[in-house]
Amino acid sequence: MNTASAAPARSQQSIEIRPFDAPVGAEVLGLDLSQPLPADDFARIHRAHLDHHVLVFRDQRITPDEQIAFSRRFGPLQIHVLHQFQLAGHPEILIVSNVVENGKPIGLGDAGHFWHSDLSYKERPSLGSLLHAQELPSEGGDTLFANMHLAWDTLPDELKRKVEGLRAEHTYLAKYAELQRRSPWRPNLSQEQLDQVKPVVQPVVRTHPETGRKALFVSEHFTTRIVGLPQDESDALLQQLFDHSTRAEHVYRHVWQPHDLVFWDNRSLMHLAAGTPDHLRRKMYRTTIEGDEPF
Ligand code: SIN
């Protein structure tokens, strides 16, 4: 993580961090991310991110380059396998959008249709993702976040004993064909793309590398089976874990405001895009930071 900024020293901005009355999340006020962030402000943001797992930076009039620069302070950025939806000239930005122009989708319209943690199908899944609102619908388009530390903490002891130490397979392709059947946003993948998304095995319970807290790390989008269990037993156990993780008391629902930049911790959370009515436009820019190999 790049804590020592190359930015020139300047006075601290008067940042206010207001936790939400919710199982995760805080709002960050008084910060302009178009300006370079001095090391002490960065350290406050970093700490708040670890404490609250979702940070909502209000009213950020930032350019793609500024979003990329801020994201890079936390680690290298990952390029999404669907290069069709990269922002032109900025491969680090994935366009998440339901907009179709001249018969062509401009972005990935069904990103987040199932609960997931970003890039859990990679050996080094994402540390965190940043989503910047470019165009919001007048209704719908919310994003839900489930606190996977709480999900682990509140799991019945018997279930904890059952799953601790287990490993599960994650694959990008788990729901691909299903999504492809019902949306225009899932192109056929080339061999090169398929080679980038080979299945991986991850711990069912992971330890956050910075806080040491345990979290459940399985999702309905990408986890296909628990290694070593018959498929029916694995399906039933995974369903139990998914249902428990997304109980209302673990979930924060983000209702977007213009120019919100939302930064979440994929090591602590799963998220879900609640969906946008077809006749309304939604366009977001996502950057995705690489994390560690889960343990
Ligand atoms: C995502 O899963 O990255 C997209 C979430 C959203 O569009 O709300």
Image (tube, rainbow, N blue to C red):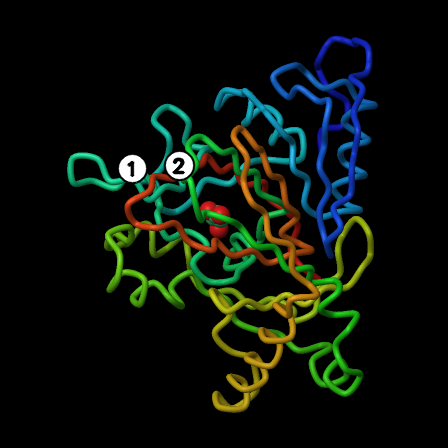
Asked whether, in this view, residue 133 is left or right of residue 50, the answer is: left
Task: Please report the residue visible at 65 percent of the width from the left and 14 percent of the height from the top.
Answer: 35
Which residue type does callout 1 highlight?
A: Ile
Residue at 67 percent of width and 34 percent of height: 74
Image quadrant where one finds the N terminus: top right
The front one of 266 and 150 is 150
Q: Which of 269 and 81 is in front in this view?
A: 269
Residue highlighted by disc 1: 106
Callout 2: 10 Å neighbours few (<14), some, many (20+)?
A: many
Asked if residue 162 lies left or right of residue 178, the reply is right
Residue with the mark numbered 2: 283
Residue 81: x and y in percent read 39, 47
The residue depicted at 51 percent of the width and 21 percent of the height is 65
Q: Residue at x 42, y 53 (%)?
A: 275
Q: Is residue 64 above or below residue 55?
A: above
Is the residue at mark 2 in contact range of ligand 1, meaning its CB lies under 8 Å from it? no
The answer to whether the residue labelled 1 contacts the one labelled 2, judged by CB atoms less than 8 Å apart, is yes
Left or right of 292, for residue 52: right
Label 1 sits on a secondary structure element that is loop
First in sequence, mark 1 or 2: give its number: 1
For residue 179, which quarter of the picture? Answer: bottom left
Q: Which amino acid does label 2 sit on?
A: Lys
The local crowd at label 1, few if under 14, some if 14 to 19, many if 20 or more residues have their Cα within 10 Å, is: many
Q: Is residue 232 above or below residue 55?
A: below
